[in-house]
Image: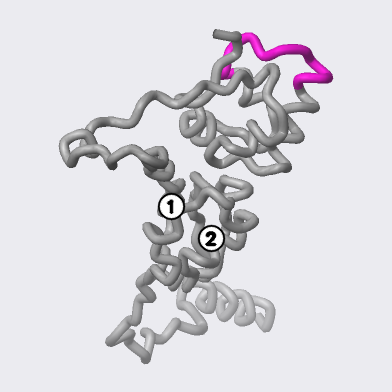
Amino acid sequence: MLLGGLGLLFALSRNTPAHTAAPPTSVLLHATVAIPTSTPLTSIIVHISGAVVQPGVYELPADARTADAVQAAGGLLATADQTRVNLAARLEDAQQIIIPVQPPPALAAPLGEAAPAEADALAPPPPPTLININTASMAELTSLPGIGETLATRIILHRQDYGDFQHPDELEYVAGIGPNLLEQIRPFIQTTSP
């Protein structure tokens, strides 16, 4: 009988839960959702070309100025026209900076001749003498816009190592000469003698 009572007690305890879960006592009344905001840039990427020593793409601090980009590119070339560049201008991410070259000096009238009339002064200048990049000296090469002594030396060494350039586009094989610089000097160069 004792066993029967224990069995009954055991069966009853299985049908009724011994412990019921209490409903949650706390209710979430307000949730704060973090919405991602754009964080301020700590650096920017700019592209500088034209009359600088090493044209290219540079990473600069977010508060950089044009002068910082020029410095990162190795400085201005002697042919740079600083009067047309605001070195204090603030830069933005993905900005392109083109440093212009100085215009050629105005042709002076020879001694004893009158200066050209005003209408003649407005006429376009005569075409420049083309420089043959296969025979040009260091001085001739450095007279080209954007070509300093370093690039002129590289052009001469490339010529010595690989032979004459067959086309001006082959200058891109010279380290430091990219498409922008090539387009800048293209009007002044040739690969054949006149």
Residue 160 is left or right of residue 81, and the answer is right
Kind of element beneath mark 2: helix
Quadrant where the N terminus is found in the figure: bottom right
Q: In the image, what residue occupies the spot 18% across and 41% down?
A: 118
Mark 1 or 2, nearer chain start: 2
x, y percent for residue 36: 39, 69
What's the amino acid at mark 2? Ala
Q: In the image, what residue occupies the spot 53% across and 29% down?
A: 182
x, y percent for residue 138: 72, 34
What's the amino acid at mark 1? Ile
Q: How is the image coloured?
A: one colour
Q: In the image, what residue occupies the spot 42% across and 45% down?
A: 105
Q: Which label sits on residue 69?
A: 2
Q: In the image, what residue occupies the spot 28% across and 31% down?
A: 124
Q: Which residues are magenta?
A: 159-169
Circles 1 and 2, Cβ within 8 Å, touching? The answer is yes
Kind of element beneath mark 1: strand
- The residue at which mark 1 appears reads as 97
Residue 120 is left or right of residue 25, and the answer is left
